[in-house]
Amino acid sequence: MSDFDFFEDTYGIEAAQQTQNILIDTQERIGMVLDLLPMGLFIHQPMGILFANQAACSIFGQTSDAMVGQHILDFVSEKNRPLIQHLMDDAFDKNDPAIIDELDIIQPNGNHKVFKIIASSLPWEGTPVIQILAHDISEAKFNERELIRLSETDPLTGAYNRRKFITLSQTTLQQAKQQVAPLCLITLDIDHFKKVNDSKGHEAGDVALKSVVETIHICLKRHNQNLDPEDHAVLARMGGEEFAVLIPKSSPEESKRLANLIKVAIEDTPIETFLDSFHITTSIGLTTLINEDKTIDHLLRRADKALYLAKSNGRNRVEVALSDDDEQDVTHHIARSEARND
């Protein structure tokens, strides 16, 4: 054999093959380890997904084969795409992790989940690569939201409670004054509610309260349907059988139509219990924001005066006090009515 003859290096080929097998086996083992992670993990290039563990696949109800090679934006809702795109842009462009603290996702099976998303760059030769971690925080977030809901709502009817209503109304009042926009408030009271409790029992009274809230919500849904969320009328149970509705960007005429709609709807809706079916009525007072009003208490006081006038005039009606002068006239009228009753 000459100096230039070659021989087949079977040992080298076998060693190379063995090394390749070890690398493949290592990749598979790493994939198995990553599949055990309790959070979703995506390895992502700018053009598509390189790897998705089982937790990541389960988020979108996909298999790994279906996800690899696709872009994560192919699997998220249209609402969430701008958030995810911004997160990925930051992760590819910066060294610091990019974070979405809360991302609501409706899964293919209909489950509502909340995830914390963290994206960061990975050391990788050639094409840039990022890892995207999706941590399921649904239980903690739902518990937190439930605590907030309980602190803001009336436990019997589900309407806002007085504290939440005052806070919300004061903010809306300041915005209305800044924007020189109309703002109306109605207060309403179930007529002869004590007789309902005394004659039919407190359980029937509770059913009546819940029915009133459901009926008002139906009326408000119709009122709110073409309005921006920040302009929606909102309802609160202020205590006992007393309720209030704040109506942003609505004229007194429009608000009075809404008040009358609520009055008629409550009057026409039967209260159904296991033993009985009966009807109730309400008295309603309406007022509107004026320059002198500094707090929502001013509107509440004026609306309550109009409410008392509605009661003194026979109940099941809407009365209006649009100014402090109206309030004084209402007070005098109530005083005269009470004197005649005495």
Image (tube, rainbow, N blue to C red):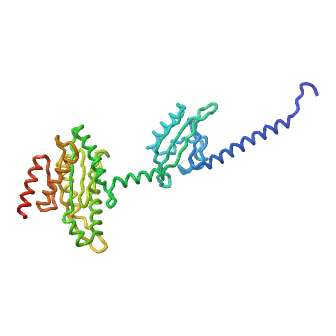
Q: Is residue 246 above or below residue 271?
A: above
**Quadrant where the image shows the N terminus:** top right
Q: Is residue 228 above or below residue 281?
A: above
Residue in the image at 62% along x and 49% along y:
36
Residue placed furthest toward the top: 3
Where is residue 167 shown, x and y percent of the image? Answer: 29, 47
Residue in the image at 50% along x and 55% along y:
109
| Viewer-side residue, 215 vs 309 | 309
Where is residue 89 shown, x and y percent of the image? Answer: 50, 34
Where is residue 8 shown, x and y percent of the image? Answer: 87, 34
Snapshot quadrant of residue 259: bottom left
| Viewer-side residue, 328 vs 45 | 328
**Quadrant where the image shows the C terminus:** bottom left
Residue in the image at 27% along x and 71% along y:
201
Total label count? 0
Q: Is residue 283 above or below residue 292?
A: below
2 left or right of 236?
A: right
Where is residue 16 shown, x and y percent of the image? Answer: 79, 37
Residue placed furthest toward the bottom: 275
Residue in the image at 14% along x and 60% along y:
311
Residue placed furthest toward the right: 1
55 left or right of 295?
A: right
